Image (cartoon, grey):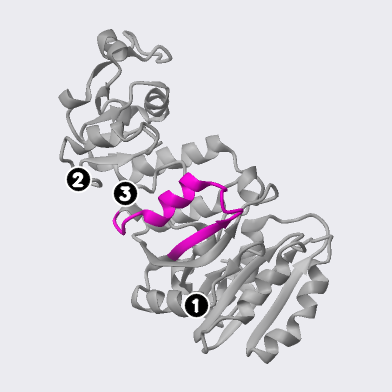
Amino acid sequence: MSTDDRNMSSHSRTGVVSIIMPVHNGEPWLTECLESVVSQTFNGSMELSVYNDASTDMTASILEGFKSKMEKAGISMLINGHNGTPVGVGAARNRAIGASGGQFLCFLDADDVMDSRRIEMQLAAAVSRPNAIVGCQFRRLPVDSTPRFTDWCNRLEQEQLYTQAYTSHGPTVAMPTWFCSREVFDKIGKFDESGKGTPEDLIFFMAHLKSGGELYRVNEVLMMYRYHPGATTHSVHRETIWEIQVSSLEEQVLCGWNQFTIWNAGKQGRRFYRTLKNENKQKVNAFCDVDEKKIEKGVYIYEESKKSPKPRVPIVHFSDAMPPFIICMKQDLTGGDFEKNLGSLNLQEGKDYYFCS
């Protein structure tokens, strides 16, 4: 453990909320973001810990210009950073956390905006759920950006925060809305610092679940989550996300199953099968589908296998398939037909099926 890691827990102060903000060239949005910090209705102790990650625009000047305004609002402002080559958002978050001293951590990206009630409401939830990452509902700007993701994330039921954690959307509690106790962070240790292309939030999220961490969402829109071409999420490789998804599903779900069916004999279902470890491939008793041509074919032959003979997996109609299922289908894309078919089986999500798509 490094000196910075030890300091993160050794100088924490009971009751203080540390707002954690990494920033790299945040000039276009930073003023609006900082104004949302000043406007918080929470009247307890707050500090804003910023790590300026080698910004080359007016970010440093904007930050310095807000110091007196923060102080008048009773908010301590800690500004750290460096020049040269950016270290990336994971490392910048870690350094902002290392410099902070609060018992609770409120994550804020420099291009987003907090509702004035955010800290007050999420702190109340985190105090009563000390082992949880606490999120909230959010709106996007522009309004019409990522409508399927926004709708999915905002309408998940509490249990679905766990059962739908293995989909391509990413964490079921969106990273820009995270709020937690410092103990939750310290249990995992830090964000991955590999830099551009690495989904450090997803890696942390899955490690949190694996360690027995809890999830909770405040059902109020407390964040404006901005969408723009320069957002770090656009640099993340889809294949990396997929590998993390499947590996986590294997570790946390499939390890407890003796057999299962893959729902979707098409491209996505076959991709899932090929990605599985050998011991989990052997647990697949069938693919299921509604496509008559796939069902008539009767079998999927794993041609890439080095085994002889090649593994052959039956393909059956979904109504003849045996649960539990791993469903490799995206939701809300079939005009309700898939959801109707799934509902006809009277299954329980998280027991009889999980999504991985």
Say few, some or many: other residues with alpha carbon within 10 Å of mark 3 (under 14 / 14 to 19 / 20 or more).
many
- Residue 200 vs 71, above or below: the answer is above
Height in image: 219 above or below 318? Answer: below
Q: Three-letter amino acid code at disc 1?
A: Arg
Residue sitting nearer the eye, 143 or 235 = 143
- Observer-nearest residue: 37 or 314? 37
Q: Residue 209: where, in percent of width, then height?
A: 38, 56
The disc label shown at residue 117, or none? 1
Q: Nearer the viewer, residue 171 or 285?
A: 171
Question: Is 242 within the magenta?
Answer: no
Disc assigned to residue 278: none
Kind of residue at badge 3: Thr
Query: What element does badge 1 sit on?
Result: loop
Q: Which residues are magenta?
A: 135-159
Name the spot of residue 117 as percent of width and height, x first: 49, 77
Task: Pick whichever of labels 1 and 2 is earlier in the sequence.
Answer: 1
Q: Quadrant of the N terminus?
A: bottom right
Is 139 inside the magenta-drawn segment? Answer: yes
Mark 1 vs 2: CB contact within 8 A: no
Instruction: Name the amino acid type tagged 2.
Output: Gln
Give the residue at x 22% y 25%: 318
Gap between marks 1 and 2, in whole Å? 35 Å
Residue that mark 2 sits on: 348
- Marks 2/3: CA–CA distance: 10 Å
Give the residue at x 79% y 61%.
55
* Placement of the C terminus among the 4 image quadrants: top left
Q: Which mark is residue 163?
A: 3
Residue 326, given in percent of the width and then of the height, sits at 30, 35
Q: Are marks 2 and 3 in contact (CB under 8 Å)?
A: no
